[in-house]
C-alpha cells in the first residue's frame, strides 16, 4: 500500500483515507462546538442545574482519535471534554448528553447523572466517574476481558487530562497497562491547567511524555490544535496498539478555551496564553486545512454549521420534553438496571 505520510505526522495509507478521517473528524468537531454553544446558553439562562463542562479547544484531539475506532469492537473512555470524540463514535451522543443534562428518564443513566458522566458499556463506552484516574484501570480491565475472550484486533482509548496523570490510581493503571502490554492508547490532553493549577505547578519533569516513557510505553506528542497532524499521530498510535505493540502514550497540546466548568471564568489564564492559542483555535485551523486540500468549500461548511445547529436544537428540545425519573419507583441498581429507551 502507498504511504503518503510518515514520521511525526504518522502514516496514512492513501489520500482518500486521510480525507475521510479528516471530514468525519471535522463534522464531529462542529457538532460538539454547536452542542457546547447551546448547553452554555441554557446554563446561563438558568435552565440547567449543576455543572456544565465544555470541550472548547479539545475538539481536534477528541475527534482525531475516535474516528479511528470501531464501535462494537473497541473501547472508548471519554473524559469530561470528549463531546467531539463521543460524536465521532456515534452521533446519538448529542441527544444522550442533552438527556443527561436534563435528567431524562430515557437517557442511558435514566436521569441519575446530571451532565457528562454517562456511558453505554455494552457498546464499549464505560460511564466515566468523576474520580480522576479511576477509569484507567476500568479500561485496562475491559481490554483484559477481551484478551481472555480471545478477541483480537481491538484497542481501547483512555482519555485523561494533564492534572489527572498525577493521581495515584492513574500510576497503578499505567504500570499495569505497560507490564501486561495491553492494547491501549493513553491520550493525555495537556490543556495547560488542572482547574486553576498551571503545568508549572503540576509536574517537575520536562514533558508529560517523560511519564509514559518511565513506564516503558511508546510515546509521541502532537499539536492538538492541528487536526491533520493530530490525525496522523493518533492513527499511528492506534494502529500500533491494535497490532500488539503494547500501550501507546500520546501527549496532545492545547488550551482549555473556557473555564473548568461554565461556573468558572478562568481569569487565572494569562492574556498572553489566551492570545497564543486564539491564533490556533482548532475549528478554524481544521477549516483552513480542509479548504487548502480542496476537501471543503465555504458553502459546504456553511451548510454543515446550519445542519449542526438544527441537529443540536432538536436534541435539546426533545430532551427537555422528556420525563424525569420518579424516585419512589426508581431502580437504583447501577449494574443490572436498564434505561427506559424511547
Ligand atoms: C481524585 C480527584 N481529585 C480531584 C478531583 C476534582 N477535580 C475534578 S476535575 C479536576 C481537574 C482536572 O484537571 P485535568 O486532569 O488537567 O483535566 P482538565 O479539566 O484540564 O481537562 C479536579 C482537580 C477529582 N474529580 N478527583
Ligand atoms: Mg488539564
Image (cartoon, helix red, strand yellow):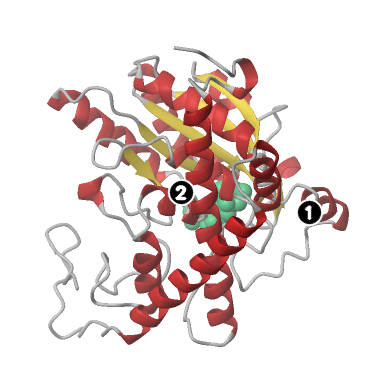
Q: Residue at x 45, y 37 (%)?
A: 170
Q: Residue at x 46, y 50 (%)?
A: 79
**Total of numbered circles in the picture?**
2
Label 1 CB less than 8 angstroms from ligand 1: no
Q: Taking 130 as reference, is 328 left or right? A: left
* Secondary structure beneath label 2: helix
Q: Position of residue 36 (x, y in %)?
A: 55, 67
> Mark 1 = which residue?
278
Q: Taking 85 as reference, is 329 left or right? A: left
Q: Taking 258 as reference, is 104 left or right? A: left
Most foreground residue, 15 or 331: 15
Q: Taking 278 as reference, is 17 left or right? A: left
Most foreground residue, 231 or 122: 231
Q: Position of residue 109 (x, y in %)?
A: 27, 66
Quarter of the picture holding the N terminus: top left
Give the CA distance from mark 1 to mark 2. Answer: 22 Å
Q: Residue at x 71, y 46 (%)?
A: 288
Q: Earlier in the sequence, mark 1 or mark 2?
A: 2
> Mark 2 = which residue?
85
Q: Position of residue 96 (x, y in %)?
A: 34, 66
Residue 192 vs 312, above or below: the answer is above
* Secondary structure beneath label 1: helix
Q: Position of residue 142 (x, y in %)?
A: 26, 36
Residue 214 vs 327, above or below: the answer is above
Residue 291 is tagged as none
Q: Determine whether label 1 and label 2 are within 8 Å by CB.
A: no
Residue 19 vs 133, above or below: the answer is above
Tell me which corner region of the image, top left, top right, bottom left or bottom right, holds residue 115.
bottom left
Question: Which residue ends up furthest to the top in the rendered image?
Answer: 1
Residue 202 vs 335, above or below: the answer is above
Q: Residue at x 41, y 52 (%)?
A: 86
**Dot 1, how many residues are within 10 Å of its Cα: few (below 14), some (14-19), or many (20+)?**
some
Amino acid at each position: 500500500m502507498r504511504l503518503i505520510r510518515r514520521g511525526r505526522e504518522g502514516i496514512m495509507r492513501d489520500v482518500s483515507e486521510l480525507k475521510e478521517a479528516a471530514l468525519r473528524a471535522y463534522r464531529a468537531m462542529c457538532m460538539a462546538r454547536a452542542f457546547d454553544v447551546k448547553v452554555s446558553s441554557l446554563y446561563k439562562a438558568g435552565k440547567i442545574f449543576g455543572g456544565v463542562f465544555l470541550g472548547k479547544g479539545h475538539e481536534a484531539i477528541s475527534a482525531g482519535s475516535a474516528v479511528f475506532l470501531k464501535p462494537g469492537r473497541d473501547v472508548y473512555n471519554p473524559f469530561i471534554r470528549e463531546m467531539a470524540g463521543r460524536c465521532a463514535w456515534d452521533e446519538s451522543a448529542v441527544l444522550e448528553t442533552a438527556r443527561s443534562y436534563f435528567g431524562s428518564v430515557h437517557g442511558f443513566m435514566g436521569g441519575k447523572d446530571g451532565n457528562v458522566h454517562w456511558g453505554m458499556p455494552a457498546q464499549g463506552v464505560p460511564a466515566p466517574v468523576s474520580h480522576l484516574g479511576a477509569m484507567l484501570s476500568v479500561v485496562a480491565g475491559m481490554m483484559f476481558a477481551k484478551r481472555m475472550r480471545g478477541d483480537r484486533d481491538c484497542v481501547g482509548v483512555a482519555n485523561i487530562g494533564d492534572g489527572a496523570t498525577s493521581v495515584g490510581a492513574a500510576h497503578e493503571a499505567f504500570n499495569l497497562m505497560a507490564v501486561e502490554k495491553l492494547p491501549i492508547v493513553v491520550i493525555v490532553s495537556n490543556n495547560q491547567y488542572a482547574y486553576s493549577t498551571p503545568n508549572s505547578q503540576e509536574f517537575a519533569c520536562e514533558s508529560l511524555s517523560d511519564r509514559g516513557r518511565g513506564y516503558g510505553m511508546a510515546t509521541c506528542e502532537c499539536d492538538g490544535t492541528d487536526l491533520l497532524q493530530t490525525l496522523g499521530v493518533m492513527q499511528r498510535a492506534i494502529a500500533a496498539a491494535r497490532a500488539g505493540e503494547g500501550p501507546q502514550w500520546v501527549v496532545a497540546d492545547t488550551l482549555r478555551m473556557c473555564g473548568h466548568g461554565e461556573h468558572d471564568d478562568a481569569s487565572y489564564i494569562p492574556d498572553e496564553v489566551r492570545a497564543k492559542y486564539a491564533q490556533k483555535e482548532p475549528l478554524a485551523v481544521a477549516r483552513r486545512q480542509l479548504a487548502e486540500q480542496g476537501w471543503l468549500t465555504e458553502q459546504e461548511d456553511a451548510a454543515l454549521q446550519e445542519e449542526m445547529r438544527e441537529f443540536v436544537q432538536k436534541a435539546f428540545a426533545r430532551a427537555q420534553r422528556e420525563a424525569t425519573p420518579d424516585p419512589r419507583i426508581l431502580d437504583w441498581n447501577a449494574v443490572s438496571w436498564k434505561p427506559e429507551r424511547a
